[in-house]
Amino acid sequence: MSITFSKLGVPQWVSEALARQGITEPFQIQKVTIEEGLIGHDICGRAPTGSGKTLAFGIPLVVRTKAAKPRKPQSLILAPTRELAAQICKELRAFSGKRTVSVVYGGVGYGPQRKALAKGVDILVACPGRLEDLIEQRELTLGDVKQVVIDEADRMADMGFMPAVKRILDQTSNDRQTILFSATLDRDVEQLKKRYQRNPVLREVGEKTPDIKKAIHTYSIAAKSEKSRIAADAVKALWPAIIFCRTRHGSDRLVKQLKQYDIEAESIHGGKSQNQRQRALKYFSKGKVQALVATDVAARGIHIDGVELVIHYDLPEDHKAYIHRSGRTARAGNKGIVFSIIQPDQKRASANMQKRLGISDSVHKVEPEELSDLNASTKIIHKQASEKKKTSANRPSEHRASGKKKSSNSHRKQKSNKHSQTSNHRPKAKPKAKKSSHKNRNSTKNNSQKPQLGSNNKRPQKKKSGTPNRKARRAHLQPANRSK
Ligand code: ADP
Ligand code: MG
């Protein structure tokens, strides 16, 4: 029995706008929150990444928001990162009708944000830091805010935004509706709920530790000096890859080191301007670079489907960070591999973490070159499993496959299947057609120092002119801040 948005009380003008984007059937978290959200109840929702939380709060918000006066928004959505804030704004604008939606975040100029606020913004999406700056500069006040959403409340807490969030909430109207969404509901989130929500309805969807077991977990032990080579070999075997480093400086350094191994990579971290971050994401999602090297903070809220490999280059801070990082792959019903590069002195910490995550028995020790074959074999198994499952209902990924992303997903599946049958004989293509002689020299030098690679890890083939990059087409990445 399928439920439509109309049955949940969503007005026709909204459901029609959604249908135009191929969104016709609500995901599970939307089914269990939209009705109450539309009535004005406070909601505390937990659902895994990618389960459709944006519309779960976005629809009630768009419907309930009244026209705002200049500098006095009626609704406020707080998000932990710039990327996420921009993405929410874009997603809401696609169906917000007369209601204006604008976004404010740091790392870009104040001018356009000031101008928008002065003109009047009904629904404001904001990162806490820039919002507080603008309030201090008297560009807006929050006294008229009747609806507040705190998105990714757990990330907000992890990133140290809780005091700012509380200060901001204290300035909003007392009779507001407060909606809180999070992938986990732990201590800090519980505290927010207690202090700022009135009889919230609690809605939980999906497993508490999302996604993690959908990926294949692997590791290698390597001395510090060897780590960049191991990472390069891993990316050569399997990409698109997101590589996690602990620090900004470490991320930039790794990008340079990877380039020496002939890997195209971009870093993304808090020290980069908004434009640089967006450009890196664009290159990555288009397959122009094989690896995105990210710090934990910058990676929060990045939603890109089709990431084949996540590398823990530096050990994650704790098991929560491992889950969050690893959740960048094996999304939307796809398979993926998580690869940890562990220094000998980190073996114990890492074993404890694996135990805590419940993956001790299923984690494989591998050579980086083996990742390609491992990926290929899981694709075959996964394809068989997913064919069996195809009829089962209520999985976000399946809704998506039957909705607007159908073509991209089926495209990806076909291609990966093809890949799985041939990967033993076919090297991974490099994203760039041309390499400078400098790079060629480098790669020859580096290769001669490296151990013999497996058959699947020959030198990358050059792209034939006129043929679009095969791997890039195969991955057909879907950045969440897509233009729809
Ligand atoms: P979350 O916030 O839970 O991580 P998002 O709200 O970003 O998830 O949604 C993940 C993806 O699913 C987005 O690309 C979104 O457009 C898409 N999506 C959300 N709801 C639906 C739906 N009911 N039908 C089809 N696609 C949807
Ligand atoms: Mg979200």
Image (cartoon, rainbow, N blue to C red):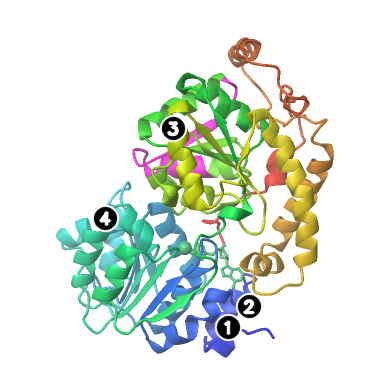
Q: Nearer the observer, disc 1 or disc 3?
A: 3
Q: Is residue 57 left or right of residue 210?
A: left
The reply to whether dot 3 and dot 4 touch (C-beta < 8 Å) is no
As shown in the figure, which amino acid type bears the numbered disc 4?
A: Arg
Q: Is mark 1 within 8 Å of ligand 1?
A: yes
Q: Nearer the observer, disc 3 or disc 4?
A: 3
Residue 95 x, y percent position in the rendering = 51, 74
Q: Earlier in the sequence, mark 1 or mark 3?
A: 1
Q: Nearer the observer, disc 1 or disc 4?
A: 1
Residue 394 x, y percent position in the rendering = 64, 74
The quarter holding residue 112 reads: bottom left
The reply to whether dot 1 and dot 2 touch (C-beta < 8 Å) is yes
In percent of the image, x 64 and y 29: which residue is there?
367
Note whether 225 is above or below 156 in the view shown: above
Which label sits on residue 25?
2
Kindly identify which residue carries mark 1. 5
Q: Crowdedness of circle 2 by 10 Å Cα count: few (<14), some, many (20+)?
A: many
Give the magenta-colored segment's residue range: 261-281
As shown in the figure, which amino acid type bears the numbered disc 3?
A: Gln
As shown in the figure, which amino acid type bears the numbered disc 1?
A: Phe
Kindly identify which residue carries mark 3. 346
Which label sits on residue 130?
4
